[in-house]
Image (cartoon, rainbow, N blue to C red):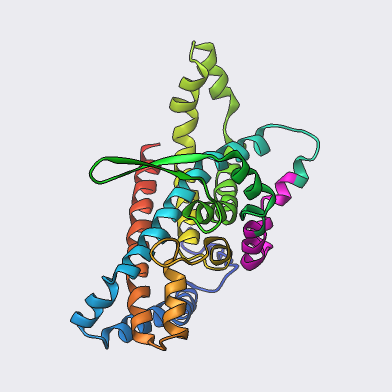
Amino acid sequence: MAALVRQPKFHRVLPGFGLSLGYTMMYLGLVVLIPLSALFFKSATLGPRRFYQIVTRPDVLSAYRVSFGTAIAAAIVNVIFGLVVAWVLARYRFFGRRLLDSLIDLPFALPTAVAGISLASLYNENGWVGRLLVSANIQYPSVSWPLALHWHPLKVANAPLGIVIALIFIGMPFVVRAVQPVVQDLDREVEEAAASLGAKRWQTFLRVIFPELCPALLTGFALSLARGVGEYGSVIFISGSLPMKTQIAPYLIVSELSSSQDDAAATAIAVIMLVTSLLMLLAVNLLERRTTRRT
C-alpha cells in the first residue's frame, strides 16, 4: 500500500537545473568571458618582449601605483567610517535618519563625472575648502633617500589625496550597505551578557561584535576596492592627470586608444590591471570565507 501512495510533486518556481545552468553559462559567456578572452587575445599579438616593454614603462608603473595605492587607501578608510555610519543608521533613531539613509545611495545614482567636477571645484585652490587649506598653510612630511626629511604644502586637487577623497565618495555606499543588515541582525542580548560579565566596551566590540561583522566588512572592502581600481569619471577632474604623479591607469588606457591609436598597448595595460584586480579580490574572498567558517 505504501508503494501505491503517490508522493506529492515538488513545484519549482524557476525552470529545471539544466535550463537554468545553460542560461547562466550563456549569460556569463556573452557578458564576461568573451570580452575578457578578447582582451587577452588582443594583447597576445604583441609578443612577450613587446608586452613586457609596455607594461614596465615608467609612466605605466607610476599609473599602477597611483590606481592601486589610492584604491586600497580609500577602501580602508571606507571600512572604518562605513562601519560607523552603518552602526548609527541601524542602532539609533533620530530626526532625518531616513533622509540620511537615502543619501548614502546618492553616489550610485550620481554620474561620476558630476561627482568629479563637484569635488574639483570644492577642493581646488579657489574652492571653498581649497582656499581654507591654502590660508592654513598645512604641511606634511615626506622622507627621501638618503633619509632626508622634506615638508610639502597639503594639496587636495591635482594630488593623490584628491583621488583618495573621490574614491571614498564613490565607495562608501558599498561598505555601508554590506554592513548595515548585519548590524541590524546582531543580538543585543549577547552584548548585554558580555557587559554583565564585566567586559568593557572595547572588549565587547573586539570579542563579540567584530567577529560577526568581519565577513561583511571584508565584502564591503572588496567591493569598494574593485570600484576604486576601475574608477575614471570622478577621478580625472580632481587628479589633473599629471604624468608620473596623479595619472591613473584607466586614463592611460584611454590616452593610448585616443592619441596613439595603439589598441594592443592599451589592452596590455588593461590585462595587468585585470589580473592584479582578480588576484586581490581572490585573496579578499578567501580571507572572507576563512573568517566566515571561523565565526
* Nearest the eye: 180 or 42: 42
x and y percentages locating residue 281 in the rendered image: 38, 57
Residue in front for this viewpoint, 255 or 144: 144
Q: Residue at x 29, y 41 (%)?
A: 148
* Residue sitting at x 65%, y 43%: 132
In the image, residue 78 sits, relative to residue 126, either above or below, namely above
* Left or right of 21 in this view: 81: right
Residue 28 versus residue 148 in the image, above or below: below
Q: Residue at x 50, y 51 (%)?
A: 161
The magenta segment is 100-120
Residue 191 sits in which quadrant? top right
Task: Check residue 116 for magenta coloring.
Answer: yes
Left or right, residue 169 beside residue 275: right
Tell me: residue 17, above or below residue 49.
above
Which is nearer the eye, 113 or 179?
Answer: 113
Query: Residue 51 placed where, x, y %?
Result: 25, 79
